[in-house]
Amino acid sequence: MLAVVKTENRQEVAVRPVQLPKLSSGEVLIEVDYCGVCGSDLHAYNHAPGYEFVELPRILGHEVSGVVVQVAEDEDQHLLNQRVVIESIQYCGECSNCRSERTHICERFRVIGLHFDGGMAQFVKCHSRFVQKIPDALSSPIAALVEPLSIAIHAAESIGRVKTGDKVWVQGCGIIGLFVGVVCGLAGAEVTISGLPRDKEARLRHASDFGLKSFIVGESANSNEKVDLLFECSGSPGGIRDGLERLKKGGRTVMVALYEQDIPLPLTKAVRNEWELLTSYGCQPVDYGSSFSILKQLESQLQNIVSIYPVTMAPQAFNDALQQKVLKPVLSLRG
Ligand SMILES: [Zn+2]
Ligand SMILES: [Zn+2]
């Protein structure tokens, strides 16, 4: 089978023939239809600090939609021929966090496509407990967005506790920023999403399709109006500091991005303003259910933000994503 392999060389992926995965007990084999290219795939592609744990060569990919074609256990027969997605965070089920339904921060968690081989391949295997069936009405390319949208749901709802009428500022207009904005908008918040001038024609172009206001740093007229809730999804060193300037006293900020360097924070100011400084990581299995419903609801707008590349063009997809030319590259594994 063909797979997209992250090689030992920085900013290089190669499309190569590799061995078909062999199932161990409890596992299922999935023939992959689509696999999204995620921010964390790009961090791995870049050999970013914090990604040293990724052993190379590695088949990347955790935003998978596909069809179960083989199961190791009789009890998993019901999954055969079903369209499924894979939960990216594979948890132990036994540690104290898992036992209190916080599987996304499992002490022994492993992410498919980073800790072990993932779904940018014609076939991928995983334990049956980490697959979720795709609702019939939802198309497979859009179903591949379920994980990034679930991450936004976790950030906006569970951590950010967004509510109707909140003024929300989303710093950063990548897919997670956009999705956080979308989830807050659906919750009845008034959302502005900020980006740079170069984002206007590419990543920010579709914000208004989802009812979000956009703000271009250095171009849009600034106002002194403060917001209730800030989501930092840019990962840029200046992003969090600029964003905090917009936060009202007693406001809440949720850091969702991952940072390639340590960033100093104005903590005295944070104390005097009693800002809540929160972090959000990953998502929980339950978030996938809400995520599927939102994907269905917004399917037609979402089709405009996805750029589909045949698997053989994976190097191009990574490059376009790194240069921020496209909002959401998705690989088609069936050619
Ligand atoms: Zn992802
Ligand atoms: Zn655990």
Image (cartoon, helix red, strand yellow):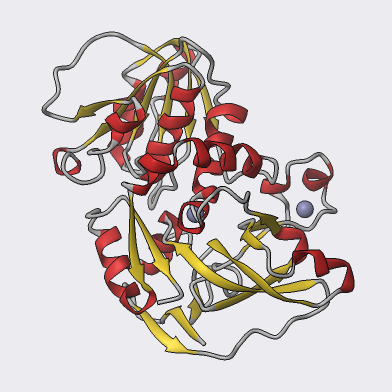
Which residue shows up at 88% across the image and 67% down it?
75
Residue at x 73% of width, y 42% of height: 102
Q: Tell me: residue 293, above or below residue 27.
A: above
Residue 97 drawn above or below residue 128:
above
Q: Is residue 226 visible?
A: yes
Residue at 82% x, 67% y: name it.
76
Tell me what residue is drawn at x 64 percent, y 56 percent. Answer: 87
In x, y percent, where is residue 89?
A: 64, 56
**Can residue 48 be seen here?**
no
- Residue 50 is situated, as x and y percent measured from the top left of the image, at 48, 59
The single residue placed furthest to the left in the displayed view is 219
Can you give x and y, in whole percent of width and height, for residue 99 in the image? 84, 44
Residue 99 shown left or right of residue 299 in the figure: right
The number of discs equals 0
Q: Left or right of 185: which side holds 127?
A: right
Front-lying residue, 18 or 68: 68
* Position of 325 relative to 292 (above/below): below
